Image (cartoon, rainbow, N blue to C red):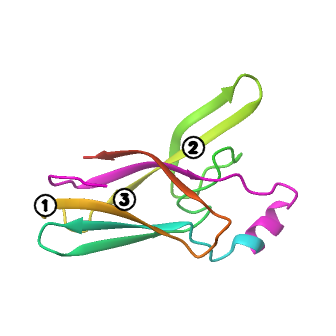
């Protein structure tokens, strides 16, 4: 994603595809332990880069999860047509090099094929 300018913080509105709810919380924790749905890579105009690997249920969760990831905040919350519960988190990442000009944001796939990361919005502050 092409970007330009400097930023101290990047806030992501993102989610992963729906995960199975036939697992209880213990089963979910065990099944997805160590799962990374993707990595955000910030590229700077000087050729440098910073990487932010996302941890499932810590930084991002399913779009209709009952709980927020432990390090995220509410982004979109509510119901759609009395049918779907929506709970999409926002996550703010502190840019490790706020003094550098940003060139682009790359999204790399994670370590599981069943976790599809969707970036729905991005804010640079």
The image quarter containing residue 21 is bottom right
Query: Can you give x and y, in whole percent of width and height, for residue 122 in the image?
Result: 36, 46
> Disc count in the image?
3
Residue position for label 3? 93
Q: Secondary structure at mark 3?
A: strand
- For marks 3 and 2, give the one nearer the viewer: 2
Q: For this view, does 118 lie left or right of residue 34?
A: left
Query: Can you give x and y, in whole percent of width and height, for residue 118 in the image?
Result: 52, 52
Are discs 1 and 3 less than 8 Å apart at CB?
A: no
Q: Is residue 28 above or below residue 49?
A: above
Q: CA distance from mark 1 to mark 2?
A: 29 Å
The circle on residue 2 is: none
- Please name the residue shown 11% across and 72% down the image: 46
The circle on residue 101 is: 1
Residue 45 vs residue 100, the one in the foreground: 45
- Which residue ends up furthest to the top in the rendered image? 81
Residue 64 vs residue 107, the one in the foreground: 107
Q: Secondary structure at mark 1?
A: loop
Q: Secondary structure at mark 2?
A: strand
Residue 68 vs residue 4, the one in the foreground: 4
The circle on residue 88 is: 2
- Please name the residue shown 31% across and 55% down the image: 1
Q: Check residue 31 for magenta coloring.
A: no
Query: Can you give x and y, in whole percent of width and height, for residue 7 in the image?
Result: 21, 54
- For marks 1 and 3, give the one nearer the viewer: 1
Which range is magenta? 1-30
Q: CA distance from mark 1 to mark 3?
A: 16 Å
Question: Mark 2: few, some, or many residues within 10 Å (few <14, many ≥20)?
Answer: many
- Please name the residue shown 88% across and 57% down the image: 22
Q: For this view, does 27 lie left or right of residue 99?
A: right
Q: Check residue 10 for magenta coloring.
A: yes
């Amino acid at each position: 994603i092409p970007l330009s300018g400097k930023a101290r913080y990047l806030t992501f509105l993102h989610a992963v595809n729906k995960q199975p709810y036939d697992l209880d919380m213990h089963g979910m924790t065990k099944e997805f332990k160590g799962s990374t749905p993707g990595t955000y890579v910030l590229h700077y105009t000087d050729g440098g880069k910073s990487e932010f690997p996302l941890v499932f249920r810590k930084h991002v969760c399913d779009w209709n999860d009952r709980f927020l990831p432990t390090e995220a905040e509410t982004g979109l919350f509510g119901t759609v047509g009395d049918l779907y519960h929506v709970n999409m988190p926002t996550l703010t990442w502190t840019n490790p090099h706020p003094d550098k000009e940003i060139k682009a944001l790359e999204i790399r796939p994670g370590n599981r094929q069943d976790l599809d990361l969707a970036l729905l919005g991005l804010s640079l502050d």
